[in-house]
Amino acid sequence: MPKRGYHHGNLKQALVDATLSLIESKGPQGFTLSEAAKAAGVTPAAVYRHFQGREDLIAECARQGYEIFADLMEYAYEKGRPSALSSFEATGRAYLAFARKYPGHYMAMFESGLSINANPELARVASRASGILEKAASDLSQHIPPEKRPPAAMFSAHIWALCHGVVELYTRGDPGARAPFPPEDLLESGIGIYLRGLGLIPQDS
């Protein structure tokens, strides 16, 4: 792995970048703070200028990941409009795209064991990401009378779980031989079946 090093005082981001590379290659629990410092080209003591320790460093990787993730979700949502269904499906595809393009961030966010609620800033950005999917879900249910409308928070959470499952089973690592269909097709068909079951889209769409 090439040493990234830091320049012009950008130590904090150099440490984050080095940590992301280590997470990708060794997993969130597979490296030490000293290894992160070495990969960034600094001493372990220098890490404490910006971070309280290893978990704090991973939390910053996760925070940056959630910011990127939320931006991608927002872009997908807007690109799919004015169709509520297109926007909803686009946010699901954005989930898969993020996991592929930013594996280090994804692992820091979802596989590091971080407590989101124990970190107010992490909770804020995570809520922003989930809020976009919930907004797309709310748009999709507007044609149903309020008293019969399924809670947007509920079915957006179900779709989030479906996205996460497809990512974990068929997108992470080298899953090509195991995937019966392309992950995007699995996700789209799964979303369609689920939404039809709730009456959110017509049976023949």
Image (cartoon, grey):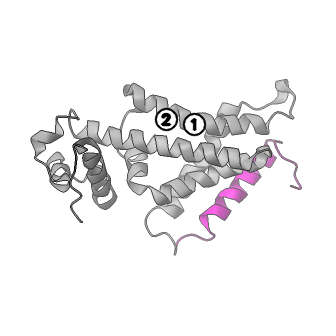
Quarter of the picture containing the C terminus is bottom right
Does 27 sit above or below residue 115?
below
Q: Amino acid at mark 2?
A: Ala
Label number found at residue 126:
2
Q: Which residue is mark 1?
A: 130
Which residue corresponds to the image point at 52% horizontal and 73% vertical from the top-left? Answer: 176
Which SS class for mark 2? helix
Label number found at residue 165:
none
Q: Is residue 14 left or right of residue 128?
A: left
Residue 84 percent across, percent down from the top left: 78, 43
Q: Nearer the viewer, residue 161 or 32?
A: 32
Residue 93 percent across, percent down from the top left: 62, 55
Q: Are marks 1 and 2 in contact (CB under 8 Å)?
A: yes
Q: Amino acid at mark 1?
A: Ser
Quarter of the view holding residue 113: top left
Q: Nearer the viewer, residue 12 or 53?
A: 12
Residue 160 percent across, percent down from the top left: 59, 44
Which SS class for mark 1? helix
Question: Is disc 1 surrounded by few (<14), some (14 to 19) or many (20+) residues within 10 Å?
Answer: some
In this rendering, does residue 87 appear at all? yes
Q: Which residues are magenta?
A: 178-205
